[in-house]
Image (cartoon, coloured by chain):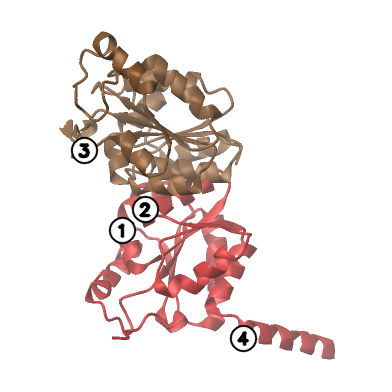
Amino acid sequence: MVAVAHAHSDSSQQAAEQGWDDIVVACLKRNDIKLVTYVPDRVLTPLIAKIHADPFFTAFATTREEEAIGIVTGAWMAGMRGTLLMQTSGFATLANVLASLVVPSQIPAIMFVSERGTLGEFNLGQALVCRTMRPVLDSLAMEHRTLTRLDEAEFVVDRSIKQAIATQAPVALILSPLLTGGKVFKG
Amino acid sequence: MRAALMNKKISTTSPTAKPGTPSGNAKIMNRYDLTCRLTARLTKGEAVIGGIGNTNFDLWASGQRPENYYMLGSMGLACPIALGVAIAQPQRHVFALEGDGSLLMQLGCLATIAARAPKNLSIVVFDNGVYQITGAQPTPAAGVADIVAIARASGIAASAWAADDDDFERLVDSALAHAAPSLIAVRIDTTAAVGATDRDPVQIRERFMRGVGVR
């Protein structure tokens, strides 16, 4: 009993020390997502750094988010699981390739979107483009989850990745400023 | 050497080439014929990713190899898809077949490919200077931009115009043997594709996945 309680305590403490970025890295590894493509965002910087620091991953930047979708699609079809990290404005460039490649071909594209344009955004363009994201996801009937709480992050990310692969369907995991702290105006 | 070879061919094999166009005086060839010549040289289960429109239609018509993938939508993504396949299966050579208009839509992928430097990825660009499938409107680049120069400047050093059909075959063999990404650009006519791909994205994907041993 004591041993169990002790183990639980250690595990809780370890979980408490993990940031959202550590949780994402752990979930990617647990689900064998080796290929990480991205167009960066300030909020994603620590996640990208941790992924690059881990030899488990093949990680690189692409010139556009569409390009990353193509790469992840090709890798999936050839037996390697991949993901795409981007910010809200990057997601806004994807409607065509989601509707014409990912959804009809049943590709489990796993997308992490750093949510800009809300909860203290200072850039009007970001605020406007943010409003297009969920309507696009809903219009394609794509699974999407907004992560706001650290204590739910592992459950949501791990289960969403597993569901995407099992059902061969894309998923967007939206990283809210409530989870990440977002990017604030320093002017 | 290659420039000399190409120049030598101007007057004899390329009467319709327009002097001064960025592709020099490469012979104007035919996409279906070249696609057949390419696939005939693939003996080791090489993957071929056919870009949108006539490019994948002619790949389909050339014989439906199980390692072929026919991209129906997502214009411009043939090269990125091929890069993903090349990363996932480094032992298998991968060809991306792309139209000039399609490549112009996603030129950044050339730099990404150069940076990743996969040893097993080659690109064939069919350049007729027009958006053939929509009514043959000229691309903005037609007669102005040089695809091979763009590819070289993007970091794909092994990029060349095929002077004629024989040169194309030599360049394919060279690409298969080359331990770095390569690009072969070909000037083609505006003849319509010989066939048309079945429009079933799931079936196309499943066939390809079986073809490359994933299923």
Q: Residue B81 got which mark?
A: none
Q: Quadrant of the N terminus of chain A?
A: bottom right
Residue A149 or residue A177, whichever sits in front: A177
The residue identified by callout 3 is B141
Kindly identify the amino acid type of the residue bearing the numbered disc 2: Glu
Q: Residue type at mark 1: give it.
A: Thr
Q: Name the subunit of mark 1.
A: A
Label 4 secondary element: helix
On what subunit does the disc labeled 2 rest? A
Distance between the Cα atoms at labels 3 and 1?
23 Å
Mark 2: secondary structure: helix
Same chain for the residues under marks 2 and 3 in the image: no
Asked if residue B67 is positioned above or below residue A94 in the image, the reply reads above
Q: Which residue is mark 4?
A: A16
Q: Position of residue B215 (x, y in %)?
A: 60, 41
Tag 3: amino acid? Ala
The brown one among the chains is B
Point out the frontmost of discs 3 and 4. Answer: 3
- A35 or B24, which is in the foreground? B24
Query: How many angstroms separate mark 2 from mark 3 (CA)?
Result: 22 Å
Q: Which residue is mark 1?
A: A93
| Chain designation of label 4 | A
Q: Is residue A155 visible?
A: no
Dots 2 and 1 on the same chain: yes
**Discs 1 and 4 lie in a common subunit:** yes
Quarter placement of the C terminus of chain A = bottom left
Looking at the rendered structure, which numbered label has been put on residue A66? 2
The picture places residue B10, in percent across and down from the top left corner, at 26, 14
Measured along the vertical axis of the image, is residue A142 above or below residue A79?
below
Q: Secondary structure at mark 3?
A: loop
Q: CA distance from mark 2 to mark 1?
A: 7 Å
